Image: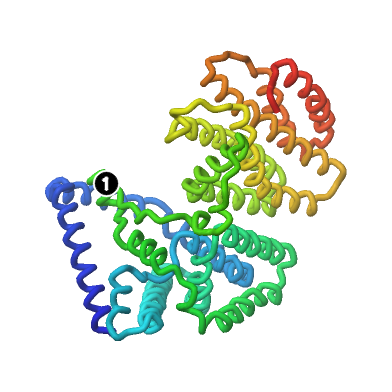
């Protein structure tokens, strides 16, 4: 079986090499490339010789070594998050259609899986070892620290193989729940900074491996696995950009459509129909939405422990970015498929959309509550109120502008917009000057008057 897999890998690499060679020959001119490399090399040499690159690099590496040893257990508990995030799109093992065809021969899926796992571990070890050698040769980081992190990264890669494989099979709700759970666990680790708590996560992962080791090939959606692996193997970004042709995954029925309750008689009520349309739309664009939400969440979470004012600035930016992104989603939905053709009740469409947005935005309250817990005061409760009121008002304003654009109605919301951004500004300065929240309370008190005046539908 190993010979067959090596044959597949060898021919796959050969085919990719031919494609990249053709791309290189069509894209680059050897003469221009040669002179361009000479110019770039000259500038790099001049920067290294004339500048203090070596001294600055040594200082950065020394700080990095101190940080990596001081927060070793925190880093060890954070790394598994990467594999959980990867499990949203990939099972962690390149079990493509070619490898799956080997199961038609006298080879079991377990045998093929074992070989592919060994390949994953070997690649990871070589990659981390190569990186460690580069650091040892060109940086002042001590050999003991490099070896420690090589074994840490390789060990977590081994331990997360089975969990990533099994999480990939789960429904998106369970995946999100697991991701939130491990992030909350890391928040506890950061708060207490206890090696015992961090080590308990490693122990838990080991237990998960023991439990699921004998269930590796049971309850597996092989079509989903092979489709994801094929996409990852053959989705070559450079070639896609050059040819302007994207490699697309094989279309499959969603998990929702395979569940029994999805097949029940549909209640043809306006709200239910709109809710179903939004469900399909969010499911189709879930990867883009999750990326934005994840990075905003990480930004807020990290800044909690750096500086209070930076966290409040990030919180204000998050409100602006997410409400703007939400209005963009709303506009885009009105311009695609059946929604673009048939007449709709836009206010009811907006109400169902807002329910989805509120459900997603609850995640941003987690770092806010952590911030309030760490810096608890009566002003913190007012800050929560300012965040909620500003977010809701700003979201309604931007969605209402979108609706009136379609209905060709021109209503001015400049005063309300000024109030919203004024509240965000007061929120930012509420850490050094908490009494500005009194002004924020006054603004929140008069906002309902202007919403009623502008007939803003809540």
Q: Position of residue 441 (x, y in %)?
A: 82, 30
Q: Is residue 146 visible?
A: no
Local packing at callout 1 (Cα closer than 10 Å; few below 14, some 14-19, many 20+) is: few
Q: Position of residue 439 (x, y in %)?
A: 81, 27
Q: Nearer the viewer, residue 130 or 334?
A: 334
For the point 44% across and 63% down, which residue is it?
90
* Quadrant the C terminus occupies: top right
The residue tagged 1 is 245
Q: Nearer the viewer, residue 183 or 352?
A: 352
Q: Left or right: where does residue 155 sit relative to residue 458?
A: left
For the point 59% across and 65% down, which residue is it?
78
Q: Nearer the viewer, residue 156 or 234?
A: 234
**In the image, farthest residue toward the right:** 378
For the point 25% across and 78% down, which residue is it?
6
Q: Position of residue 99 (x, y in %)?
A: 31, 74
Question: Coloured how?
Answer: rainbow
Q: Nearer the viewer, residue 361 or 135?
A: 361
Look at the picture and state if 123 lies above or below 190: below
Total marks shown come to 1
Q: Left or right: where does residue 38 sit relative to residue 278?
A: left
For the point 53% across and 53% down, which residue is it?
263
* Quadrant the N terminus occupies: bottom left
Q: Secondary structure at mark 1?
A: loop
Look at the picture and state if 3 lies above or below 270: below
Q: Left or right: where does residue 389 sit relative to residue 248?
A: right
Look at the picture and state if 170 lies above or below 304: below
Q: Position of residue 266 (x, y in %)?
A: 57, 45
Q: Is residue 54 visible?
A: yes
């Amino acid at each position: 079986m190993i010979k067959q897999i090596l044959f597949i890998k060898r021919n796959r690499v050969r085919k990719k090499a031919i494609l990249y060679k053709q791309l290189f020959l069509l894209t680059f001119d050897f003469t221009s490339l040669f002179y361009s490399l000479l110019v770039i090399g000259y500038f790099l040499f001049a920067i290294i010789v004339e500048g203090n690159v070596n001294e600055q690099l040594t200082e950065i590496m020394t700080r990095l070594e101190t940080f990596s040893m001081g927060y070793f257990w925190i880093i060890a508990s954070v790394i598994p998050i990467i594999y959980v995030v990867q499990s949203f799109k990939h099972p962690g093992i390149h079990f493509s259609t070619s490898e799956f065809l080997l199961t038609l021969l006298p080879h079991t899926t377990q045998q093929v899986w074992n070989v592919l796992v060994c390949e994953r571990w070997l690649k990871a070890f070589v990659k981390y070892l190569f990186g460690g050698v580069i650091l040892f040769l060109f940086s002042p980081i001590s050999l003991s620290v490099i070896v420690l992190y090589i074994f840490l990264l390789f060990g977590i890669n081994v331990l997360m193989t089975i969990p990533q494989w099994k999480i990939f099979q789960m429904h998106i709700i369970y995946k999100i729940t697991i991701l939130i759970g491990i992030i909350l666990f890391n928040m506890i680790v950061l708060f207490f900074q206890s090696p015992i708590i961090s080590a308990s996560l490693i122990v838990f992962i080991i237990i998960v491996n023991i439990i699921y080791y004998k269930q590796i090939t049971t309850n597996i959606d092989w079509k989903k696995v092979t489709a994801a692996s094929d996409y990852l193997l053959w989705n070559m970004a450079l070639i896609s950009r050059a040819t302007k042709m994207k490699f697309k995954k094989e279309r499959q029925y969603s998990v929702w459509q395979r569940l029994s309750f999805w097949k029940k008689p549909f209640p043809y009520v306006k709200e239910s129909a709109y809710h179903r349309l939004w469900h399909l739309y969010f499911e189709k664009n879930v990867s883009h939405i999750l990326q934005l939400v994840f990075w905003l969440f990480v930004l807020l979470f990290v800044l909690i422990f750096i500086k209070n004012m930076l966290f409040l600035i990030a919180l204000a930016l998050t409100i602006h970015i997410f409400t703007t992104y939400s209005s963009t989603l709303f506009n885009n939905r009105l311009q695609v498929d059946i929604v673009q053709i048939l007449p709709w009740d836009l206010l009811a469409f907006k109400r169902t959309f807002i329910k989805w947005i509120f459900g997603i935005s609850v995640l941003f309250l987690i770092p806010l509550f952590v911030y309030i817990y760490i810096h608890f005061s009566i002003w913190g409760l007012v800050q929560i109120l300012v965040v909620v009121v500003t977010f809701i008002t700003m979201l309604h304003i931007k969605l209402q502008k979108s609706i009136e654009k379609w209905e060709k109605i021109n209503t001015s919301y400049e005063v309300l917009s000024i109030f919203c951004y004024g509240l965000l500004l007061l929120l930012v300065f509420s850490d050094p000057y908490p009494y500005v929240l009194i002004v924020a309370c006054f603004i929140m008190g008069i906002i309902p008057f202007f919403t009623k005046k502008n007939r803003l539908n809540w």
